[in-house]
Amino acid sequence: MNEAGPEQERDQERELEALLELSRRGRAKLERLHEVLTTPGHFGTGATPATVVYRENKLRLLRLLDETGQPREGRPPVLFVPAPVSRYFILDLLPGRSFAGHVAAAGFDVYIADFGTPSREDRFADLEYYVEGLVRRCVRTVSSLTGEDEISVVGYCLGGTLSLLYSALHPETVRRLVLLTTSVDGDVEGGIPWVAHRMGLSGEPYDNPRLVPAAEVKSWFEMLAPGSNSTLGRVSDLWDRLDDAPERLREVRTMASWVDDVVPAPGRLLAELYRKLGPGSNGLMKGTVSVGEQAVDLAAVRMPVLSVSAEKDTIAPPAGVDAVRRVVPHVEILRLPGGHVGIVAGRAAAALWKRTVEFLGA
Amino acid sequence: MAEDKTNFDAPLIERWLAEQQQWQKTLLTYMDSMVKSEDFLVHLGNAMRGSLLAGKAYPTQPAPAASAPETPSDDKLDQILFALRQLEGQVHDLRLTLDELQADKKRTPRKAQPPKPKDPQ
C-alpha cells in the first residue's frame, strides 16, 4: 500500500491551489484580451477632426479643425511633416495624446502631411520628388490658403530630414523650423542606414528600385529595438501586458496600431538617402548633399531652429541628432528622456509639446 | 465576457470544476467572436504574433511567388505611371502659381492710368 500521509496531502493540495490560481490568471488575461480585441477604438486615423485641403498622388494635406468644425483661420500656420515610411497619425494619436492637436489648441492653424501608402510605381520616387515636390507643394498650399509668405515647419524623423533640406533650399518660406529626432550625422552609429551597413548591403538599388515591402521595413526597425525582433519575445511581452487594465491596454493597442502599421518604402528614396546621407558619405555634415540638381547649403538655414533628441532613441541616436549644431550653429538643442516614439506621443510627451508651442509662438 | 463568480470557500474540487466551466465559457466566447467577425480573426492572428495592431493583418514577408520578378513591360508601365504622378504635381504647381499671381494682383492696387494726352487740335 502506498497511502499518502497528511503532510503529502497538504502538499498536493497546495500545488493544486497554485495551479488553480495560475489557471484563473491565464483565463483572466484571455478574457481581457477578448475585451480589448472586440472593443472599437481609435485606430489608424488622426484624433483631431480635420479636412483634406490638398491631394497629390497618395499624399493628403490635412488641416485640423476646431471644436466647431471650422479651420483656425487667422492663426499662425504650422505644417507637420512625418516620416514617409510610417503612418502620419503618430502626430495626432489620441484625444488628449495628440501632439498636433495640442499645438492647434494652443492657437495655431495646424496642417499635417499624410504621405499615404506608396504603391508599386512610387518606388521611383526620390529625394527630389519628396522635397521639391510634395513638401514644397504642401508649404505652397498652406501659404496660398493662409496668405502667409512664411510658415513654421515641424519635421519628425525622416520627415525632419526632408524639412531641413527644404528649409535650406527655400529659407524665405520657413518662419521657424522644429526637427524632432532627426539624425544629421550619418557616421554616428544607429538608424536604418546602419542596419544596411552592418548587414554588408550597400542599400537599395537606385536605378532599378523596388517597393520595399512593409514587413521588411518593419524588420529593420525591429533590429534597432532589441526585444521586439522575435515573435516569441513579442508574444511574451503581450502576455505580460495583459495584466494591465483594459483602458491601458486600449492605449497600448492604439500605439501598437501605429508601431506595427509600417508602410512600404520607395526603394529609390532609401537608396539615395543611404548614398548621400548614410555612413561614410554623411552628406549633411560634409556639405555634399544635393536634391536633384541643386546643391544644399545648410548655411542658408537662418530661421530659428529647435532640434529635439531622445535619450533612449535607437532609431535616431541622440548624438547623431544633436550634431546638427555643427552645421546649423544657432540651433537650440533639446534632449528629452524617452525613446523615439515616446517623446512625441508617450505619457511624458508633454515636455516636448510645451517647448514646441513656446518656440513656435516666440 | 461572463463574470467570474468563484466561491473561494468551496472545496478545492468544486473550485476546479467551476474553473473548468469558466474556461469553457471563455473558449466559447472566442469561438463565437471568430465565427461572427472576420476582423476578430485578423486581430487574434495579430495577437498570436504578439501585436495588438488593429484594422489590418500584421505585416509579413510576401510569399516568393508574390514577389516574382517584374517583366520589362511592368517596369515601363510603372515608370510611365510615376511620370504621370510627377506631371500631376507640376500641374498643381502651375495652379498655385496662378493663385499667387491673382493674390498679388488683388494686394497691389491698380496704378491709375495716366491721362491720355489731349489732342492738340
Image (cartoon, coloured by chain):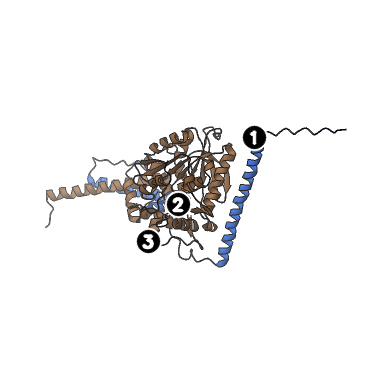
Chain colours: A brown, B blue
- Mark 3: few/some/many CA within 10 Å (<14, 14-19, 20+): few
Say what amino acid the circle numbered 3 marks.
Met
Name above or below for residue A209 compared with residue A330: below
Residue A263 visible (yes or no) = yes
Q: Quadrant of residue A214?
A: bottom left
Q: Disc 1 on helix, strand or loop?
A: helix
Q: How far apart are marks 3 and 1 (CA)?
A: 57 Å
Viewer-side residue, A350 vs A244 = A350
Which percent across, then down, holds residue B107?
64, 34
Q: Disc 3 on helix, strand or loop?
A: loop
> Along the horizontal axis of the image, is A264 left or right of B7?
right
Say what amino acid the circle numbered 2 marks.
Gly
Q: Name the residue under label 1.
A: B107
Q: Name the residue under label 2.
A: A287
How many numbered marks appear? 3
Name above or below for residue B32 compared with residue A66: below
Say what amino acid the circle numbered 1 marks.
Arg
Q: How far apart are marks 2 and 1 (CA)?
A: 39 Å
Q: Do the residues labelled 3 and 1 touch (CB within 8 Å)?
A: no
Mark 2 or mark 3, earlier in chain: 3
The chain identifier of the residue carrying mark 2 reads A
Viewport quadrant of the N terminus of chain A = bottom left
Which percent across, then down, holds residue B24?
34, 49
Viewer-side residue, A241 vs A127 = A127
Q: Name the residue under label 3.
A: A199
Same subunit, tags 2 and 3: yes
The chain identifier of the residue carrying mark 1 reads B
> Image point 38% across, 56% down: which residue?
A194
Q: Distance between the residues labelled 2 and 3?
A: 27 Å
